[in-house]
């Protein structure tokens, strides 16, 4: 029987559920994120777990919310189990755009468009990777 971690990886098709980076393009094995951090009472159950690349995981930490850079209002972070990626984010070449308060806040808190993250995606795009291929 697959471990819980294997199930999370398979469900995510081995891509970061925040920035969509594929595991095969990364140097390190992706950690499993507690969407609602254990510090905030989050449990280690499938509905509270998401595959996350090391970059997104490190920036998310125990955060569950942030401030929308457009309105400065408090907004929850993207919840991979409850929210649909395309409802909250869109691509502009290698840059991820936030379409909603949730999307903008998540891009900001997780530093999804940090120069190294965009640079890595630009290199992947040049190699023929397309983020929506699944
Ligand atoms: Zn990521």
Image (cartoon, rainbow, N blue to C red):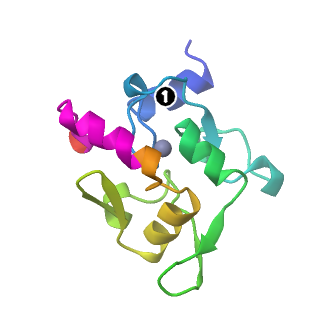
Q: Position of residue 55 (x, y in %)?
A: 55, 42
Compared with 128, 77 (above or below) is below
Quadrant of residue 123 within the rendered picture: top left
Q: In the image, is residue 79 part of the stretch drawn in magenta?
A: no
Q: Position of residue 10 (x, y in %)?
A: 44, 26
Q: Is residue 19 visible?
A: no
Given residues 53 and 11, the one toward you in this image is: 53
| 97 relative to 77 in the view: left or right | left
Q: Mark 1 highlights which residue?
A: 9
Q: Secondary structure at mark 1?
A: helix
Q: In the image, is residue 120 part of the stretch drawn in magenta?
A: yes
Given residues 116 and 97, the one toward you in this image is: 116
| Mark 1 Cβ and ligand 1 under 8 Å apart | no
Q: Position of residue 96 (x, y in %)?
A: 35, 58
**In the rendered structure, which segment of residues is drawn in magenta?**
118-131
Quadrant of residue 26 within the rendered picture: top left
Report the residue at 44% width, 51% height from top: 115
Label 1 neighbourhood size at 10 Å, few (<14), some (14-19), many (20+)? many
Report the residue at 33% width, 42% height from top: 121
């Amino acid at each position: 029987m697959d471990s819980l971690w294997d199930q999370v990886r398979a469900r995510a098709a081995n891509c970061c559920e925040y920035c969509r980076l594929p595991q095969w393009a990364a140097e390190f094995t992706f950690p499993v994120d507690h969407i609602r951090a254990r510090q905030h009472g989050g449990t280690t159950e499938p509905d509270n777990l998401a595959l996350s690349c090391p970059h997104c995981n490190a920036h998310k930490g125990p955060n569950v919310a942030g401030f929308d850079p457009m309105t400065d209002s408090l907004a929850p972070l993207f919840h991979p189990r409850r929210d649909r990626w395309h409802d909250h984010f869109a691509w502009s070449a290698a840059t991820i755009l936030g379409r909603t308060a949730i999307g903008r806040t998540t891009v900001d808190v997780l530093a999804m468009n940090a120069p190294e993250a965009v640079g890595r995606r630009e290199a992947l795009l040049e190699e023929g990777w397309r983020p929506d291929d699944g």
